[in-house]
């Protein structure tokens, strides 16, 4: 099952199960979605539940939050999360804070979803990763699926959740195919929010990743295995709440940590994971924590520079070797 089909089926089933769920965004209806995630939904549910909007993120996000105030369950699609900057006041001030400010009397059951982070050749204004931005805000839940199982189970969980959820997809993962079990295809299937998944067990080094970087981490683990290093790969799934228990339990077993993310290094998701491990498991660390992130520059447009600006599999392999004191000294490599 492709990630695209996983998201489409989750939306379809949740709209079928609950008449309060509706989808709104640019090109979600007549065009079937910019990335075809909403394919077939307009024909099935009609224009009252699949709403094409003008190019006005601030407008339709505000309408969505207002609808959620009144008990509906909107799914707001951004063509890319870079455009959510037009609507961030509604996401943070109107959606995230209302439950607390109303002493729990108001819930805001809304999902903000769309592609996040780097795609290919789309420049700085379409490549930004917003995981750490939204994950720093109390009142929001922030999810980042990797596989079809993640996409299907987490989107269902997000739509059913009584609070606002930022759902960060990846454009380059939409067409990827993953095996899914019969359990995943069941309409009641749901992935719990706030729980990471150990994608590969290991004993020498822990590698944490989310979204597309999980695939890179798994490839790196295969290469490391050939060189006698057993890497444990954790798919975070949920950025907020962060599954600190799973991460720390893994580090206490492997005694080493490599964090991987596509976003900028400063104040990133990896930085938060490093802080958590230093606070809770410092005595277990046998090596400095390694942080792999995107380059600290706006995304270049040139393909050769773009490749240098995002983490590659070999970067993860090198970091894991450094953590295991197995790297070749720079002078020897030269």
Image (tube, grey):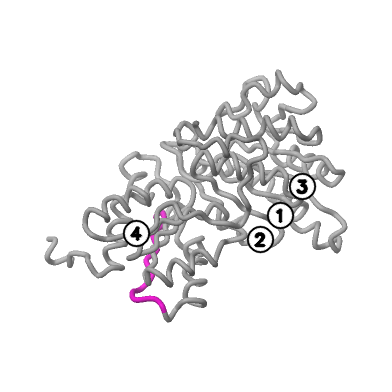
**Crowdedness of circle 3 by 10 Å Cα count: few (<14), some, many (20+)?**
many
> Which quarter of the image is occupied by the C terminus?
bottom left
Q: CA distance from mark 4 to mark 3?
A: 38 Å
Q: How far across and down, in percent of the image, does residue 53 sit?
A: 72, 29
Looking at the rendered image, the disc whose residue lies closer to the viewer, 4 or 3, is 4
Above or below for 108 versus 136:
above
- Whether pointer 2 and pointer 3 mark residues with C-beta atoms closer than 8 Å, the reply is no
Q: Which mark is residue 109?
A: 3
Q: Which mark is residue 137?
A: 2
Q: Which residue is mark 4?
A: 231
In this view, which residue lies farthest toward the bottom? 283
Question: In the displayed structure, does residue 154 sit left or right of residue 269?
Answer: right
Q: Which residue is mark 1?
A: 92
Mark closer to the chain start, 1 or 3: 1
Above or below for 238 versus 325:
above
At 56% from the left and 41% from the top, the residue drawn is 151
**Crowdedness of circle 1 by 10 Å Cα count: few (<14), some, many (20+)?**
some
């Amino acid at each position: 099952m492709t990630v695209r089909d996983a998201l489409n089926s989750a939306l379809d089933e949740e709209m079928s199960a609950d008449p309060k769920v509706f989808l709104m965004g640019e090109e979600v209806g007549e065009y079937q979605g910019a990335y075809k995630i909403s394919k077939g939904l307009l024909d099935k549910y009609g224009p009252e539940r699949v709403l094409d909007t003008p190019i006005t993120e601030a407008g339709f996000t505000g309408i969505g939050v207002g609808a959620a105030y009144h008990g509906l369950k909107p799914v707001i699609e951004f063509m890319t999360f870079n455009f959510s900057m037009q609507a961030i006041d509604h996401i943070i001030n109107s959606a995230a804070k209302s439950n607390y400010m109303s002493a729990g009397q108001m819930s805001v059951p809304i999902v903000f979803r769309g592609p996040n982070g780097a795609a290919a050749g789309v420049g700085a204004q379409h490549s930004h990763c917003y995981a750490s931005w939204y994950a720093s805000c109390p009142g929001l839940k922030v999810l980042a699926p990797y596989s079809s199982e993640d996409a299907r189970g987490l989107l269902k969980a997000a739509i059913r959740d009584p609070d606002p959820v930022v759902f960060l997809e990846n454009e380059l993962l939409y067409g990827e195919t993953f095996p899914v079990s019969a359990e995943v295809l069941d309409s009641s299937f749901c992935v719990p929010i706030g729980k990471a998944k150990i994608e590969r067990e290991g004993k020498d080094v822990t590698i944490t990743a989310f979204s597309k970087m999980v695939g890179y981490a798994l490839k790196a683990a295969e290469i490391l295995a050939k060189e006698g290093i057993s890497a444990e790969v954790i798919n975070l799934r949920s950025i907020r709440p962060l599954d600190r228990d799973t991460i720390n339990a893994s580090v206490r077993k492997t005694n080493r940590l490599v964090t991987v993310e596509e976003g900028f290094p400063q104040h990133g998701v990896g930085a938060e994971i490093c802080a958590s491990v230093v606070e809770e498991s410092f005595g277990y660390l046998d090596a400095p924590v390694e942080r792999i992130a995107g380059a600290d520059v706006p995304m270049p447009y040139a393909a050769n520079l773009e490749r240098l600006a995002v983490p590659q599999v070999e970067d993860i392999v090198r970091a894991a070797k450094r953590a295991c004191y197995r790297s070749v000294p720079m002078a020897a490599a030269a």
